[in-house]
């Protein structure tokens, strides 16, 4: 006999079944489970920063595993990726209880707006910027800013330049555009009126000494026309 408060858990499991994980979290769970914690911690920060917004855009959602964490904080979430394989995976695991829209779209090709040319209230892009060729970084920032309303918020998160000495060879192969915190802030100030820099080490968010940060966030407010 177990404790009775857990009966609801077993009943829910019997009625709804067990879940399986999409591609990337499955690999994380097999190889380094703490990466799941880091991924969810980053999305939780975004969720708290844009909580209460109506329409939000996720740029570079991958297989969409963490998207639902942000969706709970906004009314409508559109998550995009240029990789069709990831969007197929995201839609395969999509739940009717979490109404996220997963679309194939390359933000380097054009901005994205909703039907009726309605712009987004907020956008975020995690673990994407470091994969953008430096020659395309301006296009990335411009097209995201043009997808936002005049008072819109954009949050970008990526590994710091300083962290790359500790990165795996697989990560280094794709990380072609890492910056230190001050350079990242300066870059996005070309496109937004206000930019706030935060640091993250593992799952801990802080405003400490930027060169000791493993991961950088910039919270950008109000696109420059």
Image: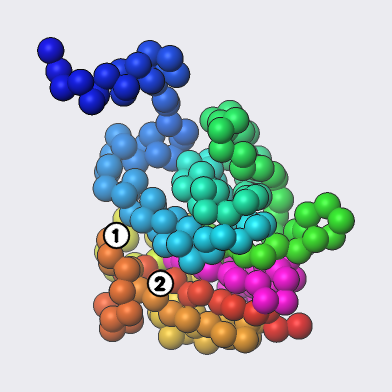
Indicate the position of residue 186 as horizontal and vertical percent values.
52, 87
**Relative to 201, 89 lies left or right:** right
Looking at the image, the residue that sits furthest to the front is 4
> Residue 28 got which mark?
none
- Residue 86 position by quadrant: top right
Say if mark 2 contacts mark 1, CB within 8 Å: no
Q: Is residue 41 visible?
A: yes
- Compare residues 74 and 56 and report the one nearer the observer: 74
Q: Is residue 99 above or below residue 59?
A: above
| Quadrant the N terminus occupies | top left
Q: Is residue 89 visible?
A: no
| Quadrant the C terminus occupies | bottom right
**Relative to 37, 172 lies left or right:** right
Mark 2, mark 1: which one is toward the viewer? 1
SS class, disc 1: loop
- Determine the residue positioned at 56% across, 33% down: 97
- Determine the residue positioned at 83% across, 52% down: 115
Question: Is residue 54 a member of the stretch shown in magenta?
Answer: no
**First to last magenta residue range:** 131-158
Question: How many numbered badges does the structure rendering display?
Answer: 2
The residue under label 2 is 216
Estimate how packed mark 2 is, as few (under 14), some (14 to 19) or many (20 or more) residues with alpha carbons within 10 Å: many
- Compare residues 108 and 215 and report the one nearer the observer: 215
Q: Is residue 214 above or below residue 85?
A: below
Q: Is residue 4 above or below residue 78?
A: above
Q: Which circle's residue, 2 or 1, is located before the other in the chain?
A: 1
- Determine the residue positioned at 43% across, 31% down: 21
> Residue 203 got which mark?
1
- Compare residues 128 and 9 and report the one nearer the observer: 9
**Relative to 165, 113 lies left or right:** right
């Amino acid at each position: 006999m177990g404790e009775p408060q857990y009966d609801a858990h077993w009943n829910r499991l019997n009625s709804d079944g067990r879940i399986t994980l999409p591609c990337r979290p499955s690999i994380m769970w097999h190889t380094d489970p703490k990466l799941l914690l880091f991924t969810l911690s980053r999305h939780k920060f975004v969720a708290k920063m844009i909580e209460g917004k109506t329409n939000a855009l996720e740029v570079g959602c991958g297989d969409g595993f963490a998207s639902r964490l942000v969706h709970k904080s906004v009314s409508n979430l559109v998550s995009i990726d240029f990789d069709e394989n990831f969007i197929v995976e995201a839609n395969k695991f999509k739940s009717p209880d979490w109404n996220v829209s997963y679309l194939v779209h390359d933000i380097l090709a054009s901005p994205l707006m909703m039907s009726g040319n309605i712009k987004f209230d907020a956008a975020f892009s995690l673990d994407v910027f470091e994969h953008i060729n430096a020659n395309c970084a301006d296009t990335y920032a411009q097209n995201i800013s043009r997808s936002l309303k005049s008072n819109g918020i954009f949050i970008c998160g990526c590994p710091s330049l300083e962290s790359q000495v500790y990165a795996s060879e697989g990560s280094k192969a794709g990380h072609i555009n890492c910056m230190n915190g001050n350079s990242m802030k300066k870059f996005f100030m070309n496109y937004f009126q206000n930019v706030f820099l935060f640091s993250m080490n593992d799952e801990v968010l802080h405003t400490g000494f930027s060169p000791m940060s493993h991961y950088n966030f910039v919270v950008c407010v109000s696109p420059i026309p």
